[in-house]
Image (spheres, coloured by chain):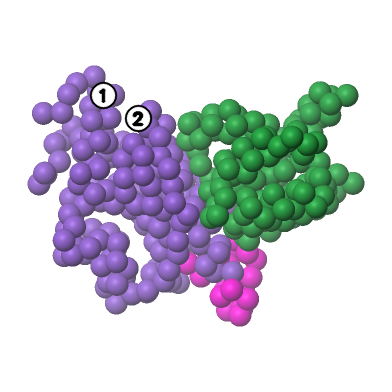
Chain colours: A purple, B green
Amino acid sequence: MTKLEPRHRDALQELFNIGAGRAAAELNEMVESPIELHVPDIRIASAIDRGSLWEVQDTESVASVQLPFTGSFDGKALLAFASESASKLVSLLTGEDVDSPALDSLRGGTLTEVGNILLNSVMGSIANVIGGDLEYRVPSYYEDLASRVMSREVTADATVIVARTRFTVESLAIEGDISIVFALGAFEELLSAIDALDGGAAA
Amino acid sequence: MACILIIDDSAFTRRQLKKVLDGLDYEVIEAGSGAEGLLALESRRPDCVVTDLLMPEMDGFGFIAAVRQRQDELKSVPIIVLSADVQDTSRSKTVELGANGFINKPVRADMVRATLASTMNRTTTLDS
């Protein structure tokens, strides 16, 4: 597969919209501030297409949470913040000052749980719409340069479908990206489920 | 004072939940996994358990199944699931395994309060 059919792209965008909308509602509850969602971007990406995952420079540090899933379709959901946004979010949720030494010890656990909630919201909403069933692995967290995170998540020989949206906590200048990385083989199963919803077969 | 056992591998969520439960005058015992939860259960029977689903070692599904398969009084301890998993299939599975309630994360004080109250009232009525 080298390109997505328009009807599949439209359906994926809508599924991702639904999932991201649920995640935004959960984040809104946590931070008590409106969340702005950007229009989702769906594309086929290869390891060299670094711009597909996040809107950050390769040399910028990102905090990332990954939630692997299997079942109706396989892949990995990713949540990423530039380090400064991550610090502001952890400070907001824990009540610790951004410069407080205590913040470091709370950072990983807090971001992991935020990622767990938001990524479950995205993937679970999609699974509910298509009548699917997903099993998750325990989420993991790490911080590194964006280029290293990307090469870790998208291996050199992989071609994956990337669905991505950026969200902004408006009043607090916190920005993050949610991405879903599907291996191409697993992606066919999702397209079949979409076709079943549409009442037709894949071409 | 009623005692609640909370089981979650996330220290962040345990803190959030404990804050709510402290405000409701519950005594709180904490465990970081399903396996730890089973040990905690055996040392003291809580009035209710609130458990996450996705945890390392033993997950919430495994914990609920292990409790409901017991042959002693701990078999019937009320269990509420508190999870980020929004899938209908996961919620159904917890009901089939014998959970008494389900709340989605993030922790909301009003939902926790209402679900605990109705679950514990319902199971007390059944016991009597």
Mark found first going from the N terminus, 1 or 2: 2
* Highlighted magenta segment, given as a residue range: A85-105
| Residue situated furthest top in the rendering | A199
Q: Do tag 1 and tag 2 residues touch (Cβ < 8 Å)? A: yes
Figure check: A100 above or below B88: below
- The residue that mark 1 highlights is A196
**Depth check, front residue: B66 or A36:** B66
Q: Which amino acid type is marked by label 1?
A: Ala
Q: Where is residue A39 in the image (x, y as percent from the top left)?
A: 30, 46
What percent of the width, then of the height, locates residue B69? 66, 35
Quarter of the figure with residue A81: bottom left
Q: Which mark is residue A130?
A: 2
- Residue shown at 80% from the left, 52% from the top: B43
Would you say residue A92 sits in the magenta stretch? yes
Q: What separation in Å lies between label 1 and label 2 (alpha carbons)?
A: 8 Å
Left or right: where does residue B32 sit relative to residue B1? left
Q: Which residue lies furthest to the front in this view?
A: B71
Based on the displayed image, in which of its 4 quarters is residue B76 positioned?
top right
